[in-house]
Image: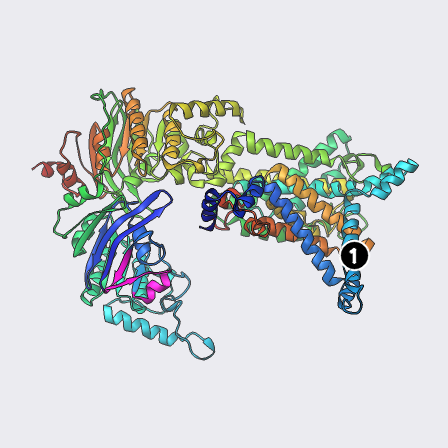
Amino acid sequence: MRIELRGITKRFGSFTANDRIDLVVEPGEIHCLLGENGAGKSTLMNVIFGQLQPEEGEIVIDGETIKFANSGEAVRRGIGMVHQHFMLVPVFSVAENVVLGFEPTKSFDRLDRKKAADEIRRVSKEYGLEVNPDAVIEELPVGLQQRVEILKALSQDAELLILDEPTAVLTPQEIEALMAIMRSLAKAGKSILFITHKLKEVRAVGDVITVIRQGRVVGSVPPTTSEAELATMMVGRDVKLTVTKEAAAPGDEVLEIRDLVVRDDRGLAVVNGVTLNVRAGEIMALAGVQGNGQTELVEALAGMRRIESGTITVRGRDVTNNKPREMLDEGLGHIPEDRQRNGLVLSMSVADNLVLNTPRRAPFARRGTRNLDAVEQNARQQVKDFDIRTTSTRELVSSLSGGNQQKVIVARELSRPLAFLVASQPTRGLDVGSIEYVHRQIVNQRNEGLGVLIVSSELDEVFALGDRIAVMHEGRITGVVDATTSRETIGLMMAGASSQSAHD
Amino acid sequence: MTENMADVLAQADPGSPVERRSLWTRFSSKSPVVLALLALVLGFLIGALVIIFSTNTVLDAWRGIFSSWGAPGHALKVTFDNVGAAYRAMFTGSVFDPSQFWHSIATGKQWDNTLTPLSETLTYATPLIIASIAVGIAFQTGIFNIGANGQAIMGGIAGASIGSMINMPAIVHIPLTLAAGIVGGMVAGSIPGFLKAYTGAHEVIVTLMLNYVIAFFLVFVLLSTPFQLPGQSNDISRTMHSSAQLAPLFGAASGLRVSYGIFIAAAVVYFAWWFLERSSLGFDFRITGNNPNAARASGINARRVIVVVFLISGGLAGLAGVVQVSSTTHYVDGNFLIGSAGIGFTAITVALLGRNRPMGIVWGSLLFAALGVGGRNMQAATGIPLDLATIIQSVVVLFVATPVLVKEIFRLRSSSAQGIQLATKGWGS
């Protein structure tokens, strides 16, 4: 199947998720869609799959302009989608899941299990997808569950297969197996749209790589393109960021991380021997393509993820495996990666959110009773100092814009006495004005002697803020370099080259 | 989508009907009180339909509407008479009876009869308020305490034991009895609390099942030596000494049952308001209930919160149980809080109705108590079964739980998330 997107635009309110996207997938082609989280990849896929209707543009399949009202129509037209979160019934068998919604029946509407199992065996054989039709889904490993999703799409005669971040949940061996399947499907004439933010994978399996950033196509390149080049395409930014800052005057070491090993939810050691230090009065920027262990590293620092081995020291005190409360008391300021999930309580007021992690600290409470006057006074002060745009301090945080929500967190963290600050993707999804503002605040704190660790996958931010830059790749620090290092070198390091070889 | 369209239309054309509709909406769609009142109106309307379809005289009148010119009018009259009589009996039985009032004014006598309906409503509402607050505080923390009834039974058993087995002056005995009730409820509440905090057991399953365990424990206790009324073979406990009883507010001679328990309920309401709105711990609870992830990141110890919530919720439920015993029956028997008397279960619905807010719960409890008390009077006066009151209660809760439906029925513009936020979340985690 040949599918062509012409000028697809999808807006959510004032936010444009997809901006005039053009894309062509040829039959038998593995087309990779590369982009950061929030770049608009999943939105685009949902448009193709009929779950969202674009405001502008058209979808052309084999020369025919198509409009899907829902995903059922897309399925009938030969489009199959494997979601990032599987749409399987855990307690049903493989065969039952594959035929779900299109069940073969015997008389009296009874499910024809034999026919269903035969169908699986036929499709499995045709494409080399081994799986036992009678196995129960919840007893299968994740890799096989994904295979069932693919089988399901194929058994509905999909000609175009959309794989939405399929490798995010897989082990390296399972990823290898998936890639082999993708190649054999392409050989059989199926078109594949493969969505990911992992550079290695697109180069390994793709025929064409299209990079999208902030809802726009940056360009389509062949898989021979270097990882450094791809990384730069992915994380570059149209608007140049400039923060005027004086040279750093670093003082004592405030944070020392040594040989840290942290496992993710799947049990993989995604932080694998990280050693890093931050001094007072400097900004250490941690660069790297997302998913290389940064998230888990920050969670470990915040006391929210168990540390397998290695140590964390704050101002000379061992804080390894401290609880979140203890880390806050050590003077950790934390601007979390996902502000709505970990940083705010959306159904509470601005004033309450501004004291979220200091509810018992004087003057906000005395002997277990909250001092609402002090809370209110603090809120007024912060709203003024940090220019939080809200109609009232009693307004629910959910009614604020993303930029102002982030300002609430920044205000809360920076107005406490801190030993060091960890800011994870502090400006993701913010408009230029808010980005400048947040950067300004962070630099001010650094000028006053705070040690700051910025985790960002945006190179511009890394260069704008970092006094030193550490690059993380596959759970390790590939090098710590000066902020004067060239983009190309950093790009190579993000792709896994050590700082030494990157310089050569 | 349609709402947005309506907005756009309203702005484009100020004279359009959409604009008129939004005017009516302005004062109402955001207010949960208005929604609750509309739900109440719907409850009574549906109750009226039930009366019409279950009363033979009304049905007969409608069957005969083609028999003569006057028949349709007659049918309407019969309908209004029956429905009116039922609801009038409900009102006079639970709130205020004008004819009795004028009689008292005229004769200066029988003031107790005038006050009896209100007294009865308050008597039923008192433990219900306390139990509903117990459930509401847990809900606000994101915890489903379905076991308030069992915890209340434990409180009742403990209170009745202390109240009946020892002798001491009232000034010590009453506080001790109430404290025993609180401890009894806490013990029952600590089981699901610790199980959830330390093993991850789902509190709905545990509390629900514990209700059965405790119901049988009640029977066991009532048939065991120190608790059972001496010389009895029935499942009935000793009677509390008068020094442990919550006395009627206007003296035993008045015949009015409303007791000093209402002051305890008032204190609990104040405590709940203070706890949720003013205390640091309550702030932790609300953060946990609204966003457990942010709670964790803010350094709140989830285990501690879970255990403490269950202690507070269980303790209050236990207090409800002991208040129930020491202000009405003064003993516990095999039917204590069993079946339709299970205030711990009613409390779940009342908490939902009151959106887990202390004052909302007070109004919800008064409404439920009035419907129950009034329903009994209606059954006695008109023969319409008490179940009608239950139907109205259920319909009200049903509509309060589906604000979108109420708004659609009354043509209120649905302001989506702004309107009513459901007090409870999913059953998972």
Magenta region includes residue A68: yes
Quarter occupied by the N terminus of chain A: bottom left
Whether residue A63 appears in this view of the structure is yes
Residue at figure coordinates x 31%, y 31% from the top left: A433
Whether residue B186 appears in this view of the structure is no
Q: Furthest residue to the bottom? A: A107
Q: In this view, does B301 lie above or below B338?
A: above
Q: Find disc 1 in the rendering and name its residue.
A: B82
Left or right of residue B190: residue B303? left
Q: In this view, does B426 lie above or below B327?
A: below
Q: How crowded is mark 1: few (under 14 residues within 10 Å), some or many (20 or more)?
A: some
Name the residue nearer the viewer: B29 or A422. Answer: B29
- The answer to which quarter of the image holds residue A73 is bottom left
Left or right of residue A321: residue A481? left
Task: Kindly state the secondary structure of the residue where label 1 is placed.
Answer: helix
Q: Which chain carries label 1?
A: B
Amino acid under disc 1: Asn
Q: Furthest residue to the right? A: B107
Give residue B149's position: percent from left, percent from top: 64, 47
Quarter occupied by the C terminus of chain A: top left
Residue at figure coordinates x 54%, y 52% from the top left: B205
Q: Give the extent of the magenta segment.
A: A58-78
Give residue A488's position: percent from left, percent from top: 13, 38
Residue at figure coordinates x 40%, y 76% from the top left: A112
Give residue A120's position: percent from left, percent from top: 31, 71
Magenta region includes residue A4: no
Give residue B207's position: percent from left, percent from top: 57, 49
Name the residue nearer the viewer: B229 or B125. Answer: B125
